[in-house]
């Protein structure tokens, strides 16, 4: 290397929490030219920023924190879509393998897109009141969907601190309502097999009733009892059991095949972000991961979901959209576990506590349609400045 060449390059970046996730946020125009377009160069940059691939599974040499909730990257730009403010592209970085999964959205980080867009100067100043709410209209590029992020403004600035408590996040913050518009798959049915409940045959594991839904993110729902669980499990109960994780990955792969998301089981290895697999149960009392008692009367249903091969510490935002959508369609496994019948909201228990989500489902001549799913999250800038990566990152 030429001595005049710096050993590292600096890239402007913002480290943000959104919901129960964290990620490194970039404005598209701030990326090196090689990474301003999709492709291998962009993936190499993002993997090096996060610290992947890491055979130790720790991401010590990067911004990631060795969980699916924190191995995330976001690229935001002025929208190319009519009547939208910004484009939001999400990259889920594999921890131990050399790839970035672009197949889905991060619902938790969606809450941070509005605040980031305002901080980055992507929203005209005349849209921002001295006090009130700015609704940032986001085009989610990965899944071609609209998200409305309602950002509170106090004294002309984004309100980040507040009293809103979100289970899975230690400190309270300002509440941000996020609306996921028409969250079902735009290219097909919300239920890709045409059924509310399917028989999912998984060689070597068993055959299960399953609700396969594509709303928010493709998700496979199965009954907890059918796979030997109570639905009250915490992370260590699943993540310390390699055989259990292997079974879930096999279920996920066969579910993806049945949903038409992949053409061969081999493809599932490079599509870790989607689909999700989750198991549901009727309400039961349990101690959350923080030691707080969740009473069976506090919730309508229990849900545990896996992300990137591990049980999630709370709930992925996109999976919460899938839960809301499935709960509001009578006859799905989620709806039945929540007591059945017509619903417009559901409160579910997850390992860190509870979350209320809403959805409005209509049965049309095209099948079931969800107009929007709504949830409250929070977001906060943790650090801003530059990330540094070795200058040879693109070689």
Image (cartoon, rainbow, N blue to C red):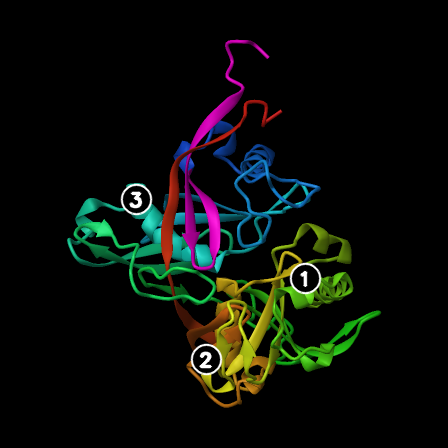
Q: Residue furthest top?
A: 3
Q: How many residues crowd mark 2 within 10 Å: few (<14), some (14–19), many (20+)?
A: many
Q: Name the side, left or right, on which 40 lies relative to 267.
A: left
- Quadrant hosting residue 194: bottom right
Label 2 – label 1 distance at C-alpha: 27 Å
Residue 61 appears anywhere in the view = yes
Which corner quadrant holds the N terminus? top right
Q: Earlier in the sequence, mark 3 or mark 1?
A: 3
Q: Which residue is mark 2?
A: 346
Instruction: Identify the residue at image location x=51%, y=52%.
Output: 142
Tell me: residue 242, above or below residue 2. Answer: below
Helix, strand or loop: magenta stretch: strand
Q: Secondary structure at mark 3?
A: helix
Instruction: Identify the residue at image location x=59%, y=34%.
Output: 44
Q: Secondary structure at mark 1?
A: helix
Q: Earlier in the sequence, mark 2 or mark 1?
A: 1
Which corner quadrant holds the C terminus? top right
Q: Position of residue 198 (x, y in %)?
A: 68, 79
Tell me: residue 96, above or below residue 348. Answer: above
Q: How many residues crowd mark 3 within 10 Å: few (<14), some (14–19), many (20+)?
A: some
Total marks shown come to 3
Q: Name the side, left or right, on which 54 lies relative to 37.
A: right
Q: Nearer the viewer, residue 364 or 7?
A: 7
Q: Which residues are magenta?
A: 1-27
| Mark closer to the observer (3, 1) | 1
Q: Which residue is mark 3?
A: 119
Q: Which residue is mark 1?
A: 239
């Amino acid at each position: 290397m030429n001595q005049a060449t710096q050993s590292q390059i600096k890239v402007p970046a913002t480290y943000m929490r959104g919901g129960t996730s964290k990620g490194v946020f970039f404005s598209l125009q701030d990326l090196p030219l090689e990474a301003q377009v999709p492709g291998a160069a962009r993936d190499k940059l993002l993997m090096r920023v996060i610290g992947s691939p890491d055979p130790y599974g720790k991401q010590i040499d990067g911004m990631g924190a060795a969980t699916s909730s924190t191995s995330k990257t976001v690229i935001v730009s002025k929208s190319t879509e009519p009547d939208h403010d910004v484009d939001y592209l999400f990259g889920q970085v594999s921890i131990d393998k050399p790839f970035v999964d672009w197949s889905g959205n991060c619902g938790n980080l969606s809450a941070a897109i509005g605040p980031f867009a305002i901080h980055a100067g992507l929203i005209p100043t005349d849209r921002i009141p001295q006090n009130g709410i700015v609704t940032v209209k986001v085009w989610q590029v990965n899944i071609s969907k609209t998200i409305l992020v309602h950002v509170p403004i106090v004294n002309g600035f984004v309100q980040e601190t507040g009293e809103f408590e979100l289970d899975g996040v230690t400190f309270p913050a300002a509440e941000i309502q996020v609306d996921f518009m028409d969250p079902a798959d735009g290219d097909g049915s919300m239920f890709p097999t045409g059924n509310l409940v399917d028989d999912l045959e998984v060689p070597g594991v068993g055959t299960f009733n399953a609700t396969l839904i594509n709303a928010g993110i493709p998700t496979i729902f199965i009954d907890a009892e059918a796979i030997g669980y109570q639905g009250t499990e915490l992370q260590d109960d699943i993540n310390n059991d390699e055989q259990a994780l292997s079974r879930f990955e096999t279920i996920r792969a066969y579910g993806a095949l049945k949903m038409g998301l992949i053409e061969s089981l081999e493809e599932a290895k490079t599509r870790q972000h989607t689909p999700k697999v989750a198991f549901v149960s009727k309400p039961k009392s349990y101690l959350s991961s923080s030691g707080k008692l969740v009473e069976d009367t506090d919730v309508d249903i229990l849900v545990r979901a896996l992300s990137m091969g591990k049980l999630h510490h709370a709930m992925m935002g996109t999976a919460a959209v899938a839960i809301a959508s499935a709960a509001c369609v009578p006859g799905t496994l989620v709806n039945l576990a929540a007591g059945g019948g017509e619903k417009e909201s559901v409160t579910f228990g997850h390992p860190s506590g509870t979350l209320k989500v809403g959805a409005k489902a209509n049965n049309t001549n095209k099948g079931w349609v969800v107009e929007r799913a709504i949830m409250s999250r929070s977001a906060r800038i943790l650090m801003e400045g530059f990330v540094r990566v070795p200058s040879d990152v693109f070689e």
